[in-house]
Amino acid sequence: MKYDEEILNLLEQNARLSVEDIAAMTKKSPDEVKGIIKQMEDEGIILKYGAVINKEKLNGTDDKVRVQIQIQVSPEREHGFDKIADRIYRYPQVKSVYLMSGGYDFMVVIEGDSLKEVGLFVSEKLATLEGVRSTKTCFVLKTYKENDVIYVEDEKDRREGAMA
């Protein structure tokens, strides 16, 4: 199936759009839009719908530690990188796994409740996996933009204007 890029773009921008709204925006019938969305879901093009949450604004209620880990591995014969990626992404702490070009093979994003928890996960789980040659851990200090969403607010100039 050739996917409908226009509908996908609309859903990426706002997954809460109704079928009727999408139909009006794309000049398609609601039944046609519903069928296209269902087919894209069935074929695994649309995997999930969700909200983007600025966790820094939760006022300490979600002080998760977020980490990016660069991992060098030895690919497995006949399976390449896929088998080790499978072992990595099955951990619940792992939020994302990317096969990379350059100086390392995988970039893994994990979250934990504390620095200690993250450190133990890396040293006891990831670094000890068969095939892992090295890891490099970078802690996320602040998110400015992610997945096309800007997390920082424009600061207003709080100085009083000069009157002429």
Image (cartoon, grey):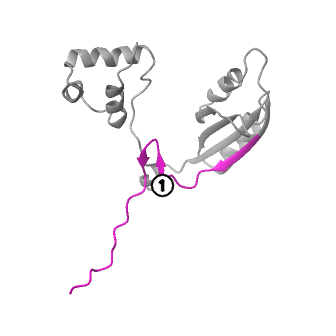
* Res 121 seen here: no
Q: Which corner quadrant holds the C terminus?
A: bottom left
Viewer-proximal residue among 153 and 10? 10
| Residue, disc 1 | 60
Image spot of residue 40 (x, y percent) = 39, 17
Image spot of residue 25 (x, y percent) = 22, 30
Q: Which residues are magenta?
A: 135-164
Left or right: residue 34 versus residue 76 is left
Left or right: residue 61 versus residue 9 is right
User: Where is 138 relative to 82, above or below?
Assistant: below
Q: Secondary structure at mark 1?
A: loop
Left or right: residue 159 versus residue 47 is left
* Res 67 seen here: yes
Image spot of residue 61 (x, y percent) = 46, 51
Which residue sits at x=65%, y=38%?
A: 107
Q: Which corner quadrant holds the N terminus?
A: top left
Which residue sits at x=24%, y=15%?
A: 32
Viewer-proximal residue among 104 and 70? 104
The residue type indicated by label 1 comes to: Gly
Viewer-proximal residue among 24 and 62? 24
Q: How many marks?
A: 1
Q: Quadrant of residue 31?
A: top left
Mark 1: few, some, or many residues within 10 Å (few <14, many ≥20)?
Answer: few
Residue 144, magenta (yes or no): yes
Which residue sits at x=64%, y=37%?
A: 108
Q: Quadrant of residue 157?
A: bottom left
Residue 25, magenta (yes or no): no
Which residue sits at x=43%, y=52%?
A: 151
Image spot of residue 86 (x, y percent) = 65, 23
